[in-house]
Image: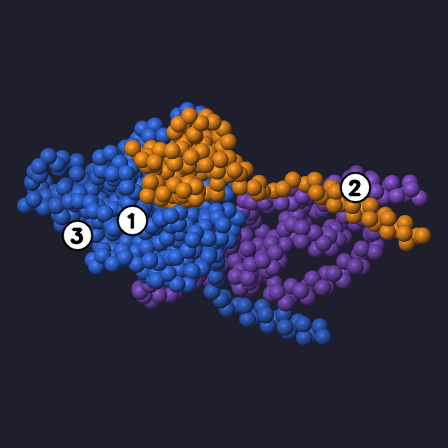
Chain colours: A purple, B blue, C orange
Amino acid sequence: MTRSLIYSLAFHTTMIFLTILSLPFMLREPIDLPPIVSVELIQISDKTNIPYAPKARKIIEETKKKEKERLVSEQAPPTAKAKEKPDKIPLPNEQKEEKKIIKKKQNPEEIKPEIRQSSEFEKKEIVDTNQIAALIDKAKEEEVTKQKKTNKITQSNQKNSFATGLTLSEEDALRAQIFGCWSVPLGLPYDEDLLVRIKLNLKKDGTITKSEILDHQRMNRPGQKFYKVLAESALRAVRLCQPLKVPPTGYDKWKEIQLNFNPTEMLKG
Amino acid sequence: MKKTILIVLLNFLLINKSYSLIEVDITRGNLDPLPIAVSPLHVDINSERYKDLKIKELGNNISKIIEHNFRSTGLFNPLKKEAFVQKPDIAHLKPRFEDWRLIKAQALVTGKILIKNEKLKVEFRLWDLAAGKEMTALAFTTTPSNWRRVAHIISDKIYERLTGENGYFDTRIIYVAESGPKSQRVKKLAIMDQDGAKTKYLTLGNELVLTPRFNPTNQMVTYMSYFRNMPRVYLLDIETGTQEVVGNFPGMTFAPRFSPDGKKIVMSFAKDGNSDIFTMNLETRVVERITDHSSIDTSPSFSPDGKFIAFNSDRSGLQQIYVMRSDGSGVKRITFGNGIYGTPVWSPRGDLIAFTKMRKGKFYIGVMRTDGTGERLLTENFYQEAPSWSPNGRVIVFYRETKAGLKGEGFSAKLWSIDITGYNERQLKTETDASDPSWSSLLSK
Amino acid sequence: MIFNKNLKNILIVIFTTLLLSACSTAKKSGSSSDDAYTGKETVKYLASGVPDRVFFATNKSSLTTASRATLRKQATFLRKNKKLNVTIEGHADERGTREYNLALGERRANAAKDYLMTYGISGKRISVISYGKEKPVNASSTPLAWSQNRRSVTVKVN
């Protein structure tokens, strides 16, 4: 009995000691993390995504899933190995699960029946290249879904690009180009509504034939001088950026585009 | 079922044949300073001589001051003159925009000056190089000896056009010029242009002078002096140099500031160990008591509409910031963070209060909303205090002291400024050590 | 029996907890005489055995026991020299804002003056002036220097 008492006492004392020791740590201020800067790695692909309407895309995915399920049961061993690969390649966390499912979908399609007979080592290699190609495609798809979740503004974008054919990669290229040209006027009050919409008419080589600020009257209203300054900076950016990075084809789709300049995110940070 | 899916699919594809307008969201840009080219002002050949002014250099000197002003804001990047292709006179008439764009400039400043009949006539233009047209232009006349102010006025107009805010270049800063060993400092009142030029000393240094503040409406200054070993608040006229004691208080008065209409001085009066806030009307000489509390009440600062006073009180135990109506009613504490708060100063825009905060042996300059929320610390140092606002509420000037060695060596005090975004912290050039800065309002209005 | 044993265990645990938690050091130095200077280095004397100054803790204007002892000596000295008038100078260290330090110096000077008055010295003989942080006696930036600068100094006027 006394032994258990001693043990209990010893453990309790240790716990209390540890708590007291850790108290200063708890009272210390939380470390100020530097603001997290998201970096987008933009790839300009020469592949154009086949434009599917969002609803249609879902239906196609469903049909593909049904196919995959059939295939998976036939080829259980290869897919089991395939599962290991995704972990090594860095991916956004939320998408990991989705990835695995998509992984399964791709692999069964790529692996041809003959390969099953070759050695394990070879098989792995073939699986590798297939997976990487699959990854490149999937990475773009994930960005789409990620954007859906995080960025409400681009919701309409995504619909448009799927519908009209300006791929996300091309859009990103244009956006990145304008990022570089736009000198954001510092010190604008960021809690005001500061959205400047500019409609551009473009030539095939990306030069501007006409530019129009959609909220033109707002610029000259009294008390809207910040809006005027912002609009002018946006116009300057667009003009100095010529020729704009436009897609080589599909001129009819993008001969008229609208750029929405919104510095709120930047000013808040 | 499959048929309906097919029809739906077809519908979608068909509908999207008519291409709707592509919208691209631009939510990021670069925060680099705007590249701007300031061409030297063209001096008209018909300009007459004026005293000992170097007329030929005037156009160049004015542009140099403008460049220095722009660079000091951290918002503009004035480009090097060696790259300029067009001569000042032609550039002012019709700039070749492509040439200027080649050096990566986004805006161009040109101008010309003429001295005739003892008057200086100035004209300047601001060009948008991307659009290829004039953004703003102005012409005005002044005395030739005011040529530095010409540069500042042009800077203000351009700053306003490009940022949407009022400028702050045509202003002065009054401060205490310090020298000597730390335990026996010699202190004089000094005044200079905001860019450090034209320093003038207003007192001789025979007695301690502290905390000078500008009258927002005219050329009067209030400060505290130990003249005849009696620490009191004084009024000083910069133009004439005349000084007078403010009021007839039977004890130390200190920490003076003007009301926004320039008609009253608000200050602390200390007696029997207690300091309270009083005002005195400069016209009627009527003195009013504003606080009546056994704690130390000091560092009062009016809101720009004159309705409220922010002040420093230790009635809760340690120094905190309070806001009350200008008649003394409705006292509300607004600082509740960890640390000690002092020197509250209301922004001329009315939206923020700047302050000094002390915590764990460090001094911070910060800003907060007038209800105490949104506290933002801008800079940290071993010792710094006494923020003062530029007239557009955008920049804060304050002073810093360095740590002294065991014999008091290595001690220095200097003026610093910082943008309210926390960017662009820089030291102001002064001839001597300096403390207690105060920023004037725009000299031209 | 079992209940008693349990109770005993519980009590031992509680007792140990209290014992250990009592060992944690206090976060703030509470007492007001904590960093008031107690040395003799900068002290001058009005007369033999009568120090001319008293010292204060950071941000405080309350008199320590030592300060009161010094002031009593000063009071005795002033009672003996009835024609002597004095000025009490109040000072603060450099670790505070300038304006508040002026007020704090004034409070410290008055703390000394009030105490002298309770020992029968007429208020008319004592004038008060605050120098805030403007006249440090020790120019360095160390806690020792700061403690030496937080003072009320009694100065002979005539």
Let me know if marks 1 and 2 both belong to one chain.
no
Which residue is identified by label 1? B250
How many other residues sit within 10 Å of disc 3, few (<14), some (14-19) or many (≥20)? few
Left or right of A85? Residue B195 is left
Q: Residue at x 42, y 37 (%)?
A: C75
Question: Could you tell me which chain the residue with mark 2 belongs to?
Answer: A
What's the mark number on residue B353? none
How many other residues sit within 10 Å of disc 1, few (<14), some (14-19) or many (≥20)? few
Which residue is identified by label 3? B139
What's the mark number on residue A13? 2
* Residue A179 rendering spot, x and y as whole percentages: 45, 50
The reply to whether residue A60 is visible in this rendering is yes
* Residue A109 rendering spot, x and y as whole percentages: 74, 53
Alpha carbon distance from label 1 to label 2: 64 Å
Let me know if marks 1 and 3 both belong to one chain.
yes
Q: Residue at x 20, y 58 (%)?
A: B283
Question: Could you tell me which chain the residue with mark 3 belongs to?
Answer: B
Q: Are marks 1 and 3 in contact (CB under 8 Å)?
A: no
Q: Residue at x 10, y 43 (%)?
A: B115
Alpha carbon distance from label 3 to label 2: 84 Å
How many other residues sit within 10 Å of disc 2, few (<14), some (14-19) or many (≥20)? some
The kind of secondary structure element at disc 3 is strand
Amino acid type for the residue under numbered disc 1: Pro
* Residue B220 rendering spot, x and y as whole percentages: 22, 49
Left or right of A80? Residue B282 is left
Classify residue A195 by image quadrant: bottom left
Question: Which is nearer the N-term, disc 1 or disc 3?
Answer: 3
